[in-house]
Amino acid sequence: MANEFLQRGIRGTSAHTDAAVVFEGLDWQQAGEKPEKCPHSVWQLLWHMNYWQDFMLAYLKGEAPRNPEHAAETWPEDPRPASEQDWVQEVERFSAGL
């Protein structure tokens, strides 16, 4: 039952938004812009979410992921993706992890 609720939440039923489509319509250049008074760009947030998603998936598989020594390791330095390909790959990585 808990698994069903989790799946429904991730895939956007009831009051939830489908997490797999949250980045649709946002191009790679827009994703690199840091809005005023925001500490991170969408690119940085996506990269950070992927870092921890990969960490938790490894942990759930029984692996022993390395804990970062510093929080900075979990964020990309550059607020912008280097290319459109990098952006697409990170969005696909996020969706695959769901």
Image (cartoon, grey):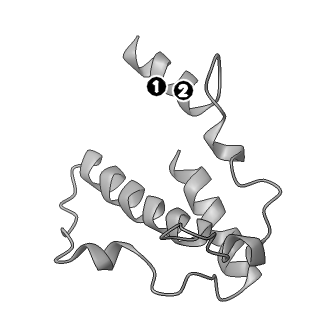
| Residue 20 found in image quarter | top right
Left or right of residue 66: residue 52:
right
Question: Considering the numbered disc 2 on the image, is that residue within a helix, a strand or a loop?
Answer: helix
Q: Is residue 9 above or below residue 74?
A: above
Number of labels in the image equals 2
- The residue lying toward the viewer, choosing from 17 and 59, is 17
Find residue 39 and report its horizontal and vertical position in percent: 47, 70
Q: Amino acid at mark 2?
A: Gly
Left or right of residue 4: residue 74:
left
Left or right of residue 16: residue 2:
left
Q: Residues within 10 Å of mark 1 (few under 14, many from 20)?
A: few
Find residue 34 and report its horizontal and vertical position in percent: 61, 74
Q: Residue at x 78, y 53 (%)?
A: 24
Q: Residue at x 71, y 55 (%)?
A: 23
Please state, as top left, top right, bottom left or bottom right, where the N terminus lies in the image: top left
Q: Amino acid at mark 1?
A: Leu
Find residue 65 and report its horizontal and vertical position in percent: 22, 64
Q: Circle 1 sits on which residue?
A: 6
Q: Circle 2 sits on which residue?
A: 9
Find residue 70 and report its horizontal and vertical position in percent: 20, 77
Q: Residue at x 72, y 45 (%)?
A: 21
Q: Residues within 10 Å of mark 2 (few under 14, many from 20)?
A: some
